[in-house]
Image: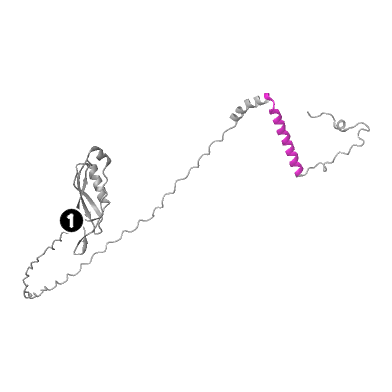
């Protein structure tokens, strides 16, 4: 609230009270620099912000502000959208003042008829003399088939008198065959090579008992024979080797 007292009363001081106080600054001394003005404005703004923040700490003030804020937002006028500028239509194309002149047709000149060419005849060529074609005699080709290949000679059959052992067969009588009373004669057919080794074995005559036949094959497989020779040269061949199985009486 502004004071209504006279200036004399406002600035008057009791006697002796103004002794020792500094004199009031003059108008020239009270003028502020730009930096001081900015600092003073920032200080005033900070005081206002601090005061508003202090008021917002009161619950009643916060409720009043919260109720008044939507009303304040509704009262703010929304700017109208900008009206698009009307684009003027393009100007019409310029029209020709005068129409182009129509070209005058040029009359066609009739050409004089050319004389017809004289007829030209091609002289006939003489016919060629006949050519004598020699007679072709068909030659008869006889294809002869190659002679048949000679069949390989049959394996030599070594006679029983020529079967000589360097290591005779070690016949093992099967124990189960002895208990069962099995006996008989087994003839083994063996292919003997030039070194006297049996290469292939077959049962030529069976004893009727499988165990005895297998024992005969095993005995002949381990045997070695003297090579059979003809004209002083060893030859291969088949030999029939008998193996007897007899029970002791």
| Image position of 2 with respect to 211: above or below | above
From the top left corner, tell me how far across and down residue 246 is, in percent: 21, 43
Residue visible at 24% across and 48% down in the picture? 217
From the top left corner, tell me how far across and down residue 87 is, in percent: 47, 44
Membership of 115 in magenta stretch:
no
Question: Which residue is disc 1 drawn over?
Answer: 161
In the foreground, 155 or 231:
231
Say which quarter of the image contains residue 173.
Answer: top left
Secondary structure mostly seen in the magenta stretch: helix
In the foreground, 43 or 82:
43
Could you tell me which quadrant the N terminus lies in?
top right
Question: For this view, does 174 lie left or right of residue 74?
Answer: left
Report the number of discs.
1
From the top left corner, tell me how far across and down residue 194 is, in percent: 24, 59
Question: For this view, does 168 lie left or right of residue 139?
Answer: right
Question: For this view, does 123 lie left or right of residue 78?
Answer: left
In the foreground, 237 or 227:
227
Say which quarter of the image contains residue 107.
Answer: bottom left
Residue visible at 70% across and 31% down in the picture? 53
Label 1 element class: helix
In the foreground, 82 or 163:
163
The residue segment tinted magenta is 35-60
Residue visible at 75% across and 41% down in the picture? 39
Question: For this view, does 71 lie left or right of residue 3?
Answer: left
| Image position of 106 with respect to 170: above or below | below
């Amino acid at each position: 609230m502004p004071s209504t007292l006279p200036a004399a009363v406002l600035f008057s001081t009791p006697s002796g009270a103004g002794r020792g106080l500094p004199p009031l600054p003059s108008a020239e001394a009270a003028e502020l620099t730009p930096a001081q003005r900015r600092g003073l404005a920032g200080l005033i703004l900070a005081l206002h912000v601090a005061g508003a923040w202090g008021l917002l700490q009161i619950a009643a003030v916060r409720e009043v502000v919260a109720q008044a804020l939507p009303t304040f937002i509704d009262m703010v006028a929304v700017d109208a959208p900008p009206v698009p500028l009307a684009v003027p239509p393009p100007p019409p194309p310029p029209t020709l003042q005068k129409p182009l002149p129509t070209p005058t047709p040029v009359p066609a000149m009739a050409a004089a008829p050319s004389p017809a060419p004289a007829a030209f005849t091609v002289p006939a060529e003489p016919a060629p003399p006949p050519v004598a074609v020699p007679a072709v005699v068909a030659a008869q080709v006889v294809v002869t088939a190659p002679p048949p290949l000679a069949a390989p000679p049959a394996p030599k059959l070594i006679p029983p008198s020529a079967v000589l052992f360097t290591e005779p067969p070690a016949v093992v009588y099967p124990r189960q065959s002895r208990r069962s009373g099995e006996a008989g004669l087994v003839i083994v057919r063996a292919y003997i090579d030039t070194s006297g080794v049996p290469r292939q074995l077959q049962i030529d005559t069976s004893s009727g008992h499988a165990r005895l036949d297998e024992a005969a094959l095993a005995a002949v497989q381990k045997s070695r024979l003297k090579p059979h020779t003809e004209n002083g040269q060893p030859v291969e061949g088949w030999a029939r080797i008998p193996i007897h199985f007899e029970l002791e009486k």
